[in-house]
Amino acid sequence: MTPPSVEPPAVTPLGYPKRMLGPGQTYESVTNTIGSIVLHHPRPKTWWAGFAVAFGLLMMFLCAVTVLLLRGIGIWGVNIPIAWGFAIVNFVWWIGIGHAGTFISAILLLLNQHWRTSINRLTEAMTLFAVACAGMFPLLHLGRPWLFYWLLPYPDTMGLWPQFRSPLVWDVFAVSTYFTVSLIFWYAGLIPDLATLRDRAPKRLQQIIYGMLALGWRGSALHWQRQQTAYLLLAGLATPLVLSVHSVVSFDFAVAIVPGWHSTIFPPYFVAGAIYSGFAMVLNIVIPLRRLYGLKGLITERHLNNMANVMLATGMMVAYGYLMEAFMAWYSGDIFEEYMMANRAFGPYGWIFWALMLLNVLIPQALWSRRVRTNTVALFIVALFVNVGMWVERFVIVITSLHRDYVPSAWGMYFPTKWDWMTLFGSVGLFLTLLFLFIRLLPAISMSEVRTVIAKHQEVKP
């Protein structure tokens, strides 16, 4: 049985939904299933194969960044008038992916949605890794990234302070705050599970490392009370960040007078798109993990169905944003806005715009069918299309709005170089490398929260 020092207290199961977990789940089975992935390393060949691919992409990323630091951002395809290229596209894309973790962990916790318990730990880790990937791109785009600390408000002998009216400074504060709160929130929920691994670890080194990370957790009533209080407060603090961080990122565009950017719909439009792409990435991670490690009893069809429903709802919000963007360009009577929309759909990058409509609007309509929402292969493919589509959306917003501005003599085209592509796929390698290491070294599913759900389920039985 699970050591008494790490068992969660019983909670009054008011309104507990049935069939949250697979049949026959007990404290012992949950602990063994999740803990064995870390302590006993099942399927090492599969893990090593995936890790090898991810690490290869990471080495490609390091190569691209090294050349960038030596030669400057001229190796990218950016130029006047398109001074923002893949770097900003990737930044906005990765920040969006990082939103699902905090949404699942914080907002669904406050809304008392118990189905989040089997996926919240993985999504919280995904948030940290995605934000780490995102935070690098604005710094690399600075031209002199070794002077990034000039963006921070610190007293210096030159008497220079950041320009607080600059969206670049807003990004620094928004991303750093989001990463800090998400990290503390993730670690606070991880402490009871680290104690479980400490008590069950077969090797002395594992006992020492997990014991140090568990911060002396013994599962007393006082420990549980303080941990739950801190967890709830952090959830309340993280909730407005879900809405504010991507709103701040959208201000990078909305405060400019560039046609296609200067729009008040951008903050809610960006937030919906962030949750949309974030849930798509969660599904792309959870579905293979669920199959490879035999977690179907913990991550059930109900979890997949709920995530698909959220993705469908946010996808419809994004589609509404596309419609309103086109409508307001026409309704405003501004010839520059009208031309921007016409050029976006029928100009040199028109085929990318229609690919965006296919990937983000048409294909996700398959999620209206419950058969698709509960079919892992179909759901994985739809989520993959959405992830690609949301990157394409950021490309359309950034590139097509810049390449034809007010003055025709200043028009130009953007052609990404091999270094742009290496940086993009290399950042995916960084994300996957961190993810593989997380699955290997820490419990991907919260044992303490799943055991709490089991305790509720046992109490509601007659």
Image: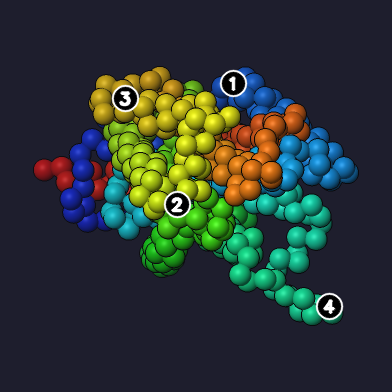
The reply to whether residue 45 is in sight is yes
Residue depicted at x 38% and y 20%: 378
Name, please, the residue furthest toward the left. Answer: 462
| Foreground: disc 2 or disc 1 | 2
Task: Indicate the amino acid at tag 4.
Answer: Met
Residue 295 in the image, given as x and y percentages of width and height: 41, 29
Residue 25 in the image, given as x and y percentages of width and height: 31, 34
The residue carrying mark 1 is 46
The span from disc 1 to disc 4 (Cα, nearest Å) is: 54 Å
Tag 3 secondary structure: helix
The span from disc 3 to disc 1 (Cα, nearest Å) is: 31 Å
| Foreground: disc 1 or disc 4 | 4
The reply to whether residue 188 is in sight is no
| For residue 435, above or below residue 96 | above
On residue 334, which mark appears?
2
On residue 386, which mark appears?
none
Residue 392 in the image, given as x and y percentages of width and height: 53, 34
Q: Residues within 10 Å of mark 4 (few under 14, many from 20)?
A: few
The span from disc 4 to disc 3 (Cα, nearest Å) is: 58 Å
Task: Indicate the amino acid at tag 2.
Answer: Asp
Disc 1 or 4, which lies upstream in sequence? 1
The residue carrying mark 4 is 158
| Foreground: disc 4 or disc 2 | 2
Q: Nearer the viewer, residue 430 or 161?
A: 161
Q: Residues within 10 Å of mark 1 (few under 14, many from 20)?
A: few
Confirm or deny contact between disc 2 and disc 1 (CB under 8 A).
Answer: no
Disc 4 or 2, which lies upstream in sequence? 4
The span from disc 4 to disc 2 (Cα, nearest Å) is: 44 Å
Disc 4 or 3, which lies upstream in sequence? 4
The picture quadrant where one finds residue 54 is top right
